[in-house]
Image (spheres, rainbow, N blue to C red):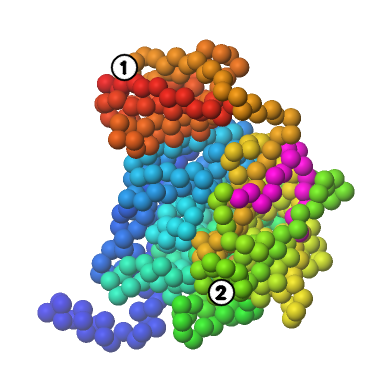
Amino acid sequence: MRRKLFFLLVFLCPLTQLKAQYNNLWIPDTLSGTNFNLTIKDTFAQIVNSGQQTITGGINGKVWGPTLFFKKGDVVHMNVQNKLNDSTTIHWHGMHLPAVMDGGPHQVIPPNTIWQPYWTVTNNAATYWYHPHLHEMTEEQITKGIGGLIIVRDSIESALPLPRSYGVDDIPLVLTDRDFTTSNQFSMVPYGDSMLTNMTLRAQTTVPAQVVRFRILNGAIERSYNLGFSDSRSFYVITSDGGLLNAPVAKTKYLLHAGERVEILVNCSGQNGTTVDLKAYNSLLGNFIAGGENFPNGPFANALGKIDFNILHLNIGAPTSNAITSIPSTLTTNTLLNVANANITRHLTISDSTGLPNVLGPNAFVLNHKLFNINYNDYEVPLNNTEIWEITSSSAFGHPFHIHDVEFNIISVNGVAPDATQAGWKDVVFIPGKTGNTSSVVKFIAKFEDYADALHPFMFHCHISLHEDEGMMGQFVVTNPNSVNTLEKIDIPVTIYPNPANSHLFVKFNNPNQSAYYIRIIDVLGRTIMMLPQPDLSNGIDVKQLKNGIYHILITENQSKQTISQTFEVE
Ligand code: C2O
Ligand code: CU
Ligand code: CU
């Protein structure tokens, strides 16, 4: 009887009402401190309300991953374990760190391998993220839901009267969209039919009636989101990708492209009991901005193209006891790079691949007239260079261009200086499509002041994963003109002890001028078990995570980059 009544109710419900069934916004767990354990695995999650679970990739959980809290100045140690059936990489998007720790396509983590990068956090307080970056697999692994947010705190931001209670008045929002198969599985398409906010379909949340901060990441494969509120209220942009703006900037719309982050303040004071929607006003986008096209069919057809749709339904509830109730008038003082100090202007191009050999499809896009080649460095950047990168695009389509290693300042987009929301630190810049026959030109300036390493490049690419995987990527190395590299064979006397080891293995270079550039631990079957870039060996290598048995340790010396090997036992 009850069952019958239920069906009756379902069928009598008008469709609009069914649509209005919201799900509570999921807030990712947090990790903080200086040691972070991240285990990436194949798993599944109940994303669609009923029916089958969706096969996903998750870090420490069922989908996506924990939000990592870093403090500027701390040395953070990552213990990344790949429990996927495939190789992967984890890139710390926006973090300034050595290329060998960066997690780009060169730092491949095989299945069942532990990767332990670490670095000193020098980034400003802002919102960053981490995600897979394995060449030609990025779209697939991001589609599975692998990734996570990074929130950096520093003394400047901490001293400001800003909302800072994670999940209460400081709410992370990871925006993406997916297409589900009839059995509720993610399909690998650039544009989904369903909006996912923190991997939640039709998300709603309750926010207190006070100033609320949203930290918003565009984690989509391709789509841009033209953010705004259903009552057209103003909100205040307080950050660009890499730090606070000088002052909050009032906006009613803000266009966020793939890979970009923005933090906004919304004043909900006195609105207890009301509701408002955060939406994507993508009907307003031009045809050549991702999400502004309206393909009736074909691989890019999707239900969200060129329409306005909900991102998050907000129920405004009671204020908290320590409520922030006003928008600060100033935030920080950014000292931007001076164009007069540039050592060089590099000229990059974006174009359609038409006419290029070996291109995956007729619609691929290319950087510098060629597809990505992992063995080719586009540029050697001398250490301490301040550089202007000028990107000329003859592509009709707009592309979010991202560079690793540095945060930059935009100089101009088609000759026009950036507006106040873009006049800070950035690591993604949108390169608009050409106008008529006129190419667009975007210029930014960056300083490459440390982490010289001739062996490991940093990447630059379009952050639309589909384009990146198709080869819209290049790389550069930062080189130290003063470092001399000896090619002659040298002796690298090393003592490893205790052997057998049961908790920590110590590696001592008998020559005090020598140190480790890279250590790999390989099992007897030749499988890489641990990858330790530029390891700090003062406390030894923690081998407690290794099974008992015999291992090879491959030690690459820092200056000579020569590798020696020894054998040890774990018991
Ligand atoms: Cu978020 Cu190279 O990317
Ligand atoms: Cu990046
Ligand atoms: Cu692109």
Residue 164: numbered disc: none
Res. 289 visible in picture: no
Q: In the rendered structure, which segment of residues is drawn in magenta? A: 376-390
Q: Residue at x 87, y 48 (%)?
A: 340
- Check the image and name the residue furthest to the right: 340
Residue type, label 2 = Asn
Name the N-terminal-most of marks 1 and 2: 2
- 34 vs 253, left or right, is left
Res. 498 visible in picture: yes
Q: Position of residue 545 (x, y in %)?
A: 33, 30
Q: Nearer the viewer, residue 486 or 2?
A: 486
Q: Which residue is mark 1?
A: 500
Instruction: Determine whether 252 is above or below 488 in the image.
Output: below
Q: Nearer the viewer, residue 36 or 547?
A: 547
Q: Nearer the viewer, residue 435 or 437?
A: 437
Please rate how many residues cluster around mark 1, counting C-alpha atoms within 10 Å: few if below 14, some from 14 to 19, many from 20: some
Per the image, label 1 sits on a secondary structure element best described as loop
- Ligand 2 within 8 angstroms of badge 1 C-beta: no
Per the image, label 2 sits on a secondary structure element best described as loop
Majority secondary structure of magenta residues: strand
Q: Residue at x 49, y 52 (%)?
A: 133
Residue type, label 1 = Pro
Q: Do the numbered discs 1 and 2 sit on residues whose CB atoms are within 8 Å?
A: no
Rendered-image quadrant of the C terminus = top left
Q: Which residue is mark 2?
A: 363
- Check the image and name the residue furthest to the top: 510
